[in-house]
Image (tube, helix red, strand yellow):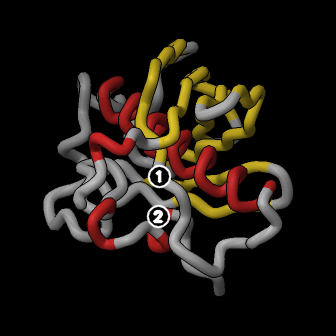
Amino acid sequence: MKPTIQHEYPDEFSYCYGCGRLNDHGLHVQSSWQEDQAVAVYLPQPHHIAVPGFVYGGLIASIMDCHAMATAAAATIQAEGEGLDRATLRFVTGSLHVDYLKPTPLGPPLIAKAIVKEQKGRKMVITLSLTVNEVETARGEIVAVRIPETMMRN
């Protein structure tokens, strides 16, 4: 089994609250590349509550955000023909737009699917859909920007 996209990130970029494998208190969102899209499955915990029985919207936005950055990284590596054998390129969020279509029930796994809609230079537009029990509860569009040098350690 291939490691997830986030497990390919170099250690210095693995502390993100949403997806960092080295953040003990994080969400640990994990994405995998499947054909022409990225897929993440996340099981919310009881403390991820908004109102009884439903998921907090901020969690949904966080999952979609980290999943979109992983999608951009994987799509870039795929376009370069290198697969996911090495540390993937890192992206940061340029903009985040989430439409909450209906309340998301707390309990079942959340499934996020993302594709690259457009690429322009260092920016990529990612569209996402979040479903629960095959019902779409949220949809998003996120601009991912290749990490600027000012955010890299020398």
Q: Could you say which quadrant of the image residue 61 lies in?
A: top left
Q: Is residue 126 above or below residue 76?
A: above
Q: Is residue 64 above or below residue 86?
A: above
The picture places residue 47, in percent across and down from the top left corner, at 18, 44
In front of the other: 12 or 27: 12
Residue 71: x %, y % from top left: 62, 48
Identified at 28% across, 40% down, the residue is 150
Horizontal side, residue 12 vs residue 122: left or right? left
| Crowd class of label 2 (few under 14; some 14 to 19; many from 20; radius 10 Å) | many
On the image, numbered disc 2 is attached to which residue? 6
Picture quadrant where residue 5 is located: bottom right
Q: Amino acid at mark 2?
A: Gln
Q: Mark 1 highlights which residue?
A: 90
User: Is residue 107 something that shows in the picture?
Assistant: yes
Cα separation, mark 1 vs mark 2, equals 10 Å
Name which of mark 1 and mark 2 comes first in the sequence.
2
- Quadrant for the N terminus, please: bottom right
Which element type, helix, strand or loop, lies under badge 2? helix
SS under mark 1:
loop
Question: At 73% across and 30% down in the image, what residue appears?
Answer: 119
Residue closest to the far bottom: 1
Residue 38: x %, y % from top left = 68, 52
Could you tell me residue 56's position as x and y percent? 30, 28
Q: Alpha-carbon neighbours of circle 1 within 10 Å: few (<14), some, or many (≥20)?
A: many
Q: Is residue 84 left or right of residue 41?
A: right
User: Residue sitting at 57 percent across and 13 percent down?
Assistant: 101
Residue for point 24% across, 49% down: 17
Amino acid of disc 1: Arg
Residue 14, quarter of picture: bottom left
Instruction: Point out the residue furthest to the front here.
Output: 154
